[in-house]
Amino acid sequence: GAGVSQSPRYKVTKRGQDVALRCDPISGHVSLYWYRQALGQGPEFLTYFNYEAQQDKSGLPNDRFSAERPEGSISTLTIQRTEQRDSAMYRCASSFSGTGGGGDTEAFFGQGTRLTVV
Amino acid sequence: RKEVEQDPGPFNVPEGATVAFNCTYSNSASQSFFWYRQDCRKEPKLLMSVYSSGNEDGRFTAQLNRASQYISLLIRDSKLSDSATYLCVVKGDNYGQNFVFGPGTRLSVLP
């Protein structure tokens, strides 16, 4: 497909289980971003990659959260030992960041993964 | 202080009204600015980029004031279909920095 694809769309898991959320960005996009969005709030930054390199993970809430993008394309966000407070919409976005600084290329979002921890 | 601040609203306006949203950002080094639109239970989508000289796209006008670190969005002749949440977004000054989103402003256009 032409857009950002996330899977699964919905995930219900029991507290204490590990979950892996997948993001397949738009082909050729250099940058990939992970966000978490609570109802009625804007997307909250978690982490982002340029190619396979994780540039900033300052938004990850704690060490139960990790992300990788080993080949510079598909990315996985993993949450270990899930807790009820992890329940949220997890959104992935990608952008084609051109060479040089700045640039105003937009971020394209996938439809998100709705995670519910019971 | 949050990096990007917006009045959460909701703004309830009649069809045909003009409505303005404001946004302030804290990082003076920010280089790129955007307004995104998010419909209920959907993903955010770009409405328009915001340029230093200000820019217009049909009924939508965006303005940037770097000195005051302030961004605005004006919607003229509001339509029912404009009802959505409008997210102010800033991006850092280096190659590939993350997009920082404001909390969003809810708009309801009433018949």
Image (cartoon, grey):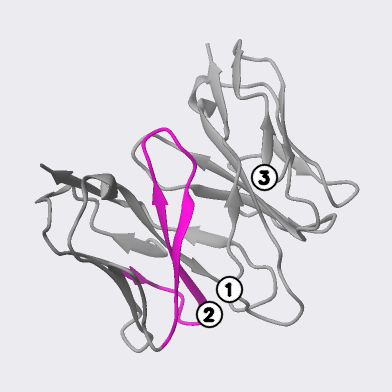
Q: Is residue A61 left or right of residue B48?
A: right
Q: Amino acid at mark 2?
A: Gln
Both labels 2 and 3 in a single chain: no
Residue B1 visible somewhere in the drawing: no
Q: Is residue B54 left or right of residue A91?
A: left
The chain that hosts pointer 3 is A
Instruction: Select label 2 or label 3 by which is in front.
Output: 3
Q: Quadrant of the N terminus of chain B?
A: bottom left
Disc 1 marks which residue?
A: A104
Disc 2 marks which residue?
A: B31
Label 2 to label 3, Cα distance in Å?
26 Å
Disc 3 marks which residue?
A: A3
- Asked if the stretch drawn in magenta spans residue A75, the answer is no
Tell me if residue B39 comes above or below residue A64 in the rendering: below
Q: Amino acid at mark 1?
A: Asp
Task: Name the residue: 56% across, 23% down.
Answer: A115
